[in-house]
Amino acid sequence: MSEPKRVVPVPGGFLMVLRQGDDVFEHLESLMIEADIPAASIRGFGFAGSIRFGFFDFGRRDYDPRDFTDVEVTGLTGTLAWKDGKPAVHAHATAAGRDFQAVGGHLLGLAVGRGSIEMTITVHDQRLERHFEEDIGANVLRL
């Protein structure tokens, strides 16, 4: 049996369906390079085998990470841009486990669990870059 397609072009962007074990960030970054995407908005949902959220600590200028396994990603939203010539994915998500309790935050990592994660990628014409802003200690999208 042949490997299922993971990405198809659609008017205005792409549809992406990732499978068990796929790393969401790796696939988004590869698509940005291969399709020469200047910038994009992303939305998605599906099942995560593992997900890492972060909450930004402005005092330390770093994320406090928290890992979860086997959860439903109920909503994922973000932007695709560039930083220092490399793809930069900035996404936030919410997810819930068997107890129906929601967790969420800045998305630091996401691997697909059983099932899939489906995403729409809306491409923008203008190339967008992220730049480090010293006063807040984070990379910010520059318009």
Image (spheres, grey):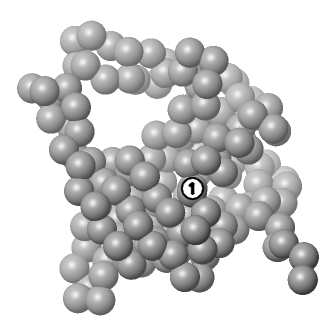
> Exactly how many numbered labels are in the figure?
1
Q: Quadrant of residue 40?
A: top right
As drawn, the residue found furthest toward the bottom would be 98
- Along the line of sight, the residue nearer the viewer: 47 or 41: 47
Q: Nearer the viewer, residue 77 or 56?
A: 56
Residue 143 can be seen, yes or no? no
Residue at far left of view: 59
Residue at the location (25% across, 19% down)? Answer: 137
Residue 138 percent location from the top left of the image: 31, 23
Q: Quadrant of the N terminus?
A: bottom right
Task: Identify residue type, mark 1.
Answer: Val
- Quadrant in which residue 103 is drawn: bottom left
Q: Is residue 24 above or below residue 30?
A: below
How crowded is the residue under tag 1: few (<14 C-alpha within 10 Å), some, or many (20+)? Answer: many
Give above or below for 135 relative to 94: above
- Figure check: 99 above or below 17: below
x and y percent of residue 51 in the render? 38, 62
Please report the residue visible at 64 percent of the width from the left and 40 percent of the height from the top. Answer: 29
Can residue 135 be seen in the rendering of this structure? yes
Give the x, y percent position of residue 101.
Answer: 22, 79
Residue at point 9%, 26% (across, down): 59
Judged left or right of residue 40, residue 74 is left
**Residue at left 44%, top 15%?**
131
User: Which residue is denoted by mark 1 in the rendering?
Assistant: 24
* 32 left or right, relative to 3: left
Residue 80, percent across and down?
58, 38
Q: Is residue 123 left or right of residue 142?
A: right
**Which element carries disc 1, helix, strand or loop?**
helix
